[in-house]
Image (cartoon, rainbow, N blue to C red):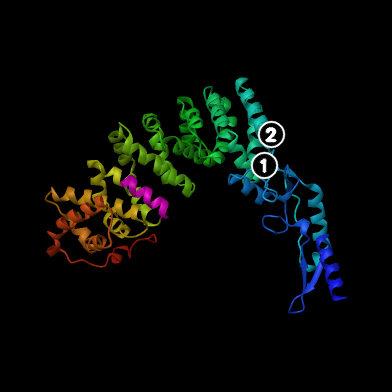
Amino acid sequence: MMISSWRRRRAARREGKLQQQRNDNGEIELTVPRDFRCPISLDLMKDPVTLSTGITYDRENIEKWIEAGNFTCPLTNQVLRSLEPIPNHIIRKKIQDWCVENRSYGIERIPTPRVPVTSMEVSDILSKINVACMKQNGKGCRDLVLKIKSLAKESERNKRCFVSNGAGCALSEAFQAFSRASFDENVAVLEEILSALAIMFPLDVEAKGFLGSASAMRCLIWFLSSGDLSRRRNAVLGLRELVSIDERKVNELSDMEGAIEALFKLIKDPICPTSTKASLLVIYKIITSSPTKEKQVKKLVNLGIVSLLLETLVDSERGICEKALGVLDGICNSEEGRQMACNNALSMPVLVKKILRVSNLTTDFSVSILWKLCKKEKTEDDASVILEALQVGAFLKLLLLLQVGCVEETKDKASELLKILNLHRNKMECVDPMDNFKDLKRPF
């Protein structure tokens, strides 16, 4: 009799019927019907989809399986004839009904998922954008780009689908096509294309080729100089894409009128940390890689880049701190830059404080800048910078750095700095570097 009862309960579970059991505390536990569970995760499916083999999985799990390079059905091991799963609306509705029936047990109804975009739909949209570009149909292209933005923002899966099907390249080509005409006439479509491109970053080489054309780069500088906050942010992200691996674009950018001023303004009046880091990276590339870097450094020094960077370093996150120190290190390669840094009261306290703080990169840059400033003072009669470095604890920090360890170049500079500082130790007693920050208005 007991065996027969057990068999009936087992058969009921196999048929997907709801089984209720009481746990040790007397509380009723629900068993999710087998057909409602994903064979991969064994969890309740939220977006059931069926493969070409006829097996139903939860979309998120099966897409991860396929993206990992698996082209077989996990359950049957059969080769998939198509990698595009089909939504299983019947199972989804049954799951939703089951959730509603058991809401008294705390089961929430799963929402009806949006149907994701397919590769065929993406190809169709991109093809229409290409036609609109050839006809110079700005309104038609803008409507299609708005559709791309809407679909890409719906889910990460949609975004990956657009990226994998060449949306970045198509949008970059469209940006180039409309930028050749008057900016004023095409500003609306150009703004939307750039906004959509920002979703597709990073771009491939072909897409960067279109975005790096002369007309497209001039348009980016125009947006960076005169656009609203969103335009300026997207423009500097576009420039970051171009200069990240192509030195030719760095050279072209450095020669464009208004580029340096616009980048400086974006640091002075920040929009967001991402745009600030992008601006610093572009400036760093210009002042370290461009053939006209001396001219650009002089221009930045005259704009007040040294004091701006030091104020930024007082309270900034790791990414901004590293890039700001990198730019300051590049600026200090010039006589004008070193002189401005020596004359700024924040230089020594900030630089010494960053050693062995934040990251190894900030330590390397800080030591490099200190080395350049103290080497300058060593060749002159005035040793005020060296004395100030001693006062804020540079000697002890550098000793500790050598004990902890660092890269060879930084080690050599730290050793030379210690020799320079040691010559003046009898003139100034080292103090706690924190004392130099007690009067600062901004938190460190």
Q: Which mark is residue 79?
A: 1
Lower sequence index among marks 1 and 2: 1
Tell me the kind of residue under disc 2.
Glu
Residue most extreme to the right? 1
From this view, report whether residue 267 is shown above or below residue 254.
Answer: below
**Residue 327 shown in magenta:** yes
Where's residue 383, x and y in %? 15, 54
**Other-residue count near label 1 (Cα within 10 Å), few / some / many at <14 / 14–19 / ≥20:** some
Left/right of residue 99 with respect to residue 323 in the rendered view:
right
The secondary structure making up most of the magenta span is helix
Where's residue 407, x and y in %? 28, 53
Where's residue 350, x and y in %? 31, 57
Left/right of residue 3 with respect to residue 144 in the rendered view:
right
The residue sitting at 26% across, 53% down in the picture is 367
In which quadrant of the rendered image does the C terminus lie?
bottom left
Looking at the image, how many numbered discs can be counted on the residues? Answer: 2
Where's residue 316, x and y in %? 41, 55
Left/right of residue 377 with respect to residue 25 in the rendered view:
left
Q: What segment carries the magenta color?
A: 316-328
Pick whichever, 169 or 324, lies toward us: 169
Q: Can residue 426 be seen in this view?
A: yes
Pick whichever, 179 or 90, lies toward us: 90
The residue sitting at 57% across, 31% down in the picture is 171
Element assignment for label 1: loop
Tell me the kind of residue under disc 1.
Val
In the rendered image, which residue does mark 2 sit on? 121
